[in-house]
Image: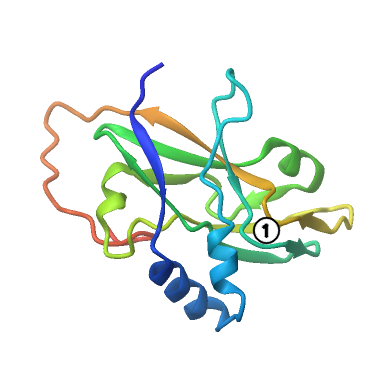
């Protein structure tokens, strides 16, 4: 196995700023931050690193929410982290990532937002099921993929931000 990356937590200040910009202040936010777990593989043969919900998430059919994971990832150049719903949640509830597949580029780690990985998830249940994800439960998985570039590639811009920051 190639060892090409390392997960870190974003600073509390970053987590707090992102959370409060979206949801407002919360008295137990420091406790939520302290309980954030770094992504892990469940088994030796797992391809995906499980991302864990920082708080309880309850979504009725058709509802969505932005999840601030509190996580950033440092990885070698020519690698990306691709993010998908956990298989069971997608199968049972049609839980979707709103952008279908999240792509975390290697240079995102150095952005002003500390490369804070976020996910927008939706319960797309067509059978009326409520999606409940307890805090500390895996909801998304990230898989590292190596990529190449064309022989005439001349990209030289530096990233600063995510979610549409490069166009």
The image quarter containing residue 17 is: bottom left
Q: Residue 119 vs residue 125: left or right?
A: left
Q: Front-most of 80 and 40?
A: 40
Residue 74's image quarter? Answer: top left
Name which residue lies at 38% across and 38% down: 6
Q: Position of residue 115 (x, y in %)?
A: 35, 56
Colour mapping used in the image: rainbow
In the image, taking residue 45 as reference, residue 64 lies left or right, namely right
Q: Position of residue 42 (x, y in %)?
A: 63, 29
Classify residue 65 as left or right of residue 1. right
Residue 156: x, y in percent?
11, 47
Left or right: residue 16 versus residue 107 is right
Comparing 2 with 147, the one in front is 2
Please report the residue visible at 30 percent of the width from the left and 51 percent of the height from the top.
108
Residue at x-position 89% and y-position 58%: 128
SS for callout 1 = strand
Give the answer, above or below, for where 57 lies relative to 3.
below
Query: Number of labelled discs?
Result: 1
Q: Which residue is mark 1?
A: 122
> In percent of the image, x 50 and y 79: which residue is there?
20
The residue carrying pointer 1 sits among few (fewer than 14), some (14 to 19) or many (20 or more) residues within 10 Å by Cα, namely: many
122 or 86: nearer the eye?
A: 86
Q: Is residue 79 above or below residue 16?
A: above
Which quarter of the figure has residue 98? Answer: bottom right
Q: Residue 144 placed where, x, y %?
A: 43, 31
The C terminus: image quadrant: bottom left
Q: Quadrant of the N terminus?
A: top left
């Amino acid at each position: 196995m190639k060892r090409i990356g390392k997960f870190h937590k974003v600073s509390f200040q970053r987590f707090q700023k992102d959370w409060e910009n979206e949801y407002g202040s919360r008295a137990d936010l420091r406790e939520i931050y302290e309980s954030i777990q770094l992504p892990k593989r469940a088994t030796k043969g797992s391809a995906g690193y499980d991302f864990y919900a920082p708080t309880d998430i309850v979504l009725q059919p058709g509802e969505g929410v932005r999840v601030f994971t509190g996580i950033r990832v440092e990885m070698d150049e020519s690698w990306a982290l691709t993010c998908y719903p956990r298989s069971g949640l997608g199968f049972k509830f049609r839980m979707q990532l709103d952008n279908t597949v999240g792509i975390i580029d290697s240079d995102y780690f150095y952005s002003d937002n500390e490369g804070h990985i976020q996910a927008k998830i939706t319960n797309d249940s067509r059978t009326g099921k409520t999606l409940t994800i307890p805090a500390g439960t895996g909801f998304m998985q990230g898989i590292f993929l190596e990529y190449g570039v064309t022989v005439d590639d001349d990209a030289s811009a530096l990233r600063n931000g995510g979610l549409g920051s490069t166009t």
